[in-house]
Amino acid sequence: MEELTAAVIEAEDKEVLIDEIMNRHGQEILQLAYSYVRNRELAEDLTQDIFVKCFSALHTYKGKSSLRTWLWRIAINHCKDYLKSWYNRNVTPSDQECFVTYSQKESVEQLVIRQDEDQQLVLSVMELPMKYREVIYLFYYEELSIKEIASVIEVKENTVKTRLRRAKELLKDRLEE
């Protein structure tokens, strides 16, 4: 489906529009939120909040960037605001888990090995400082280009490249230990 445009945003039925946006981008926003907070239930709550913000700010979308970029900017800012909040600093969430899916074509042995390797990688990524974690997540998990990442996190393209390189070095060092 082609990208929603500013003309569509002006449509009268904003509930239908926000449903379409949630259907298209809900899972990736949930995963993005999880990459920041590392807790599934909290990520689900933040995702709901993000779409509420999106709905209330729909009239501000001017079409200067893609709707996806605009939505990601809202999501990243909301997650960062949450991480800076009193609640986050003073309340400890309970269990931690990861979003990982596997093919059923693998043998049980291969599945266990892959799960262990994937979990080690995910945990290593989650231990990275935020500025490295977000570029790794956006580049490898969401498959955004360097230019798109620069736009979403509001830094220069060279900064994204540097952060990616440094993040890879940190991951390599951690995984070799």
Image (cartoon, rainbow, N blue to C red):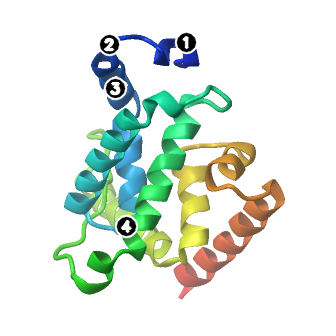
Q: Which callout, 1 or 4, points at the residue further toward the start of the chain? A: 1
Q: Residues within 10 Å of mark 1 (few under 14, many from 20)?
A: few
**Badge 3 is on which residue?**
18
**Badge 2 is on which residue?**
13
Q: Which callout, 3 or 1, points at the residue further toward the start of the chain? A: 1
Q: Name which residue type carries label 3.
A: Ile
Q: Nearer the viewer, residue 140 or 112?
A: 140
Q: Nearer the viewer, mark 2 or mark 3?
A: 2
Q: Name which residue type carries label 4.
A: Tyr
Q: Name the residue at 45% across, 50% down.
A: 75
Residue 58 position in % (x across, y down): 44, 30
Q: Residues within 10 Å of mark 4 (few under 14, many from 20)?
A: some
Q: CA distance from mark 1 to mark 4?
A: 32 Å
Which residue is situated farthest in the right direction here? 158
Residue 120 position in % (x across, y down): 41, 72
Q: Which callout, 2 or 3, points at the residue further toward the start of the chain? A: 2
Q: CA distance from mark 3 to mark 1?
A: 14 Å
- The secondary element bearing badge 3 is classed as helix
Q: Which mark is residue 7?
A: 1
Total numbered labels: 4
Residue 96 left/right relative to 2: left
Q: Name the residue at 68% across, 76% down.
A: 169
- The secondary element bearing badge 2 is classed as loop
Which quadrant of the view contains residue 25?
top left
Q: Are marks 2 and 3 in contact (CB under 8 Å)?
A: no
Figure check: 84 above or below 79: below
Q: Name which residue type carries label 1.
A: Ala
Which residue is situated farthest in the left direction here? 94
**Badge 4 is on which residue?**
82
Q: CA distance from mark 2 to mark 3?
A: 9 Å
Q: Which callout, 1 or 2, points at the residue further toward the start of the chain? A: 1
